[in-house]
Image (cartoon, grey):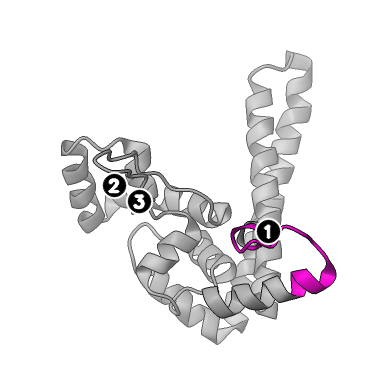
Amino acid sequence: MRQYARASGLLAKTDKLDAFNLAEFGKQMKPRRFEAKSEAGRDVSALLVRRRQLEEMLKAEKSRLRTVPPKMRGSVERMIETLKEEIKRLEKDLDEFMKENEEWQAQEQILTSAKGVGRITATTLLAELPELGKLDRKKIAALVGLAPMNADSGKKRGYRKTKGGRMEVRNVLYMSTLVATRYNPLIQAQYQQLLKRGKVKPVLSLSK
């Protein structure tokens, strides 16, 4: 907003000028309406956030297991089992939520019909991307941070790269794509074709 104000010649800053600038920005730029999460979406987001936290702790404990003295292995192993059990409990809560919510259940079934898309990917998309199904694929890709942005000037063709977006959505899509390149024939064929054209694997996984 400040950049827009400066570009408009509004260098001073007061409440009255800020209000005027906001009104002008809305009138000229017509920004996309914010799509708030539903109450159900907020509940699922909380479950998914906690699951990611536990996954990170589990990963750290597994790494620690390789370096701790023998006398400490029992403590680390017990913590690993505790974290695994807690993750299972959270996944059971997600299962119960889906059984109780027919609308989400129907949407999840559509998403998981694609090979490589599991429950966690589907629920993350539904909870963290409420715009899904309401915007076209190009806008969704930009919103998530998967749309390569041009950086051209004159005859120079710059390197295309993605920026911004929703990291939690990108992360599950990355893992889902890795699975899809093995078990989804359509994705696998496209993946191999792009590899032959010289694309690097991390770029391919994030651009599906």
Where is the N terminus found, in terms of image quarters?
bottom right
Q: Secondary structure at mark 1?
A: helix
Label 2 to label 3, Cα distance in Å?
16 Å
Quadrant position of residue 17: bottom right
Query: SS at mark 2?
Result: helix
Question: At 54% from the left edge and 68% from the top edge, which residue is drawn?
Answer: 129
Looking at the image, which residue sits at the far bottom?
102
* Relative side of 12 to 117, left or right: right
Residue at the extreme top: 69
* Picture quadrant of residue 7: bottom right
- The correct choice, above or below, for 177 with respect to 109 in the image is above
**In the displayed structure, would residue 134 be above or below residue 8?**
below
Which residue is farthest right? 15
What residue is shown with label 1? 2
Tell me where the magenta segment starts and ends, as one range: 5-19
> For the residues marked 2 and 1, what is the alpha-carbon distance in whole angstroms?
47 Å
Residue 31 at x, y = what percent?
55, 74
Residue 203 lies in what quarter of the image? top left
| Residue type at tag 3 | Ser
Residue at position x 21%, y 58% in the image: 186
Query: Which of pointers 2 and 3 indicates the residue nearer the eye?
Result: 3
Residue at the spot of label 2 = 182
Mark 1 nearby-residue class (10 Å; few <14, some 14–19, many ≥20): few
Direction front: furthest residue: 9
The one of 78 and 151 positioned closer to us in this rendering: 151
Q: Please tell me whether residue 204 belongs to the stretch shown in magenta.
A: no
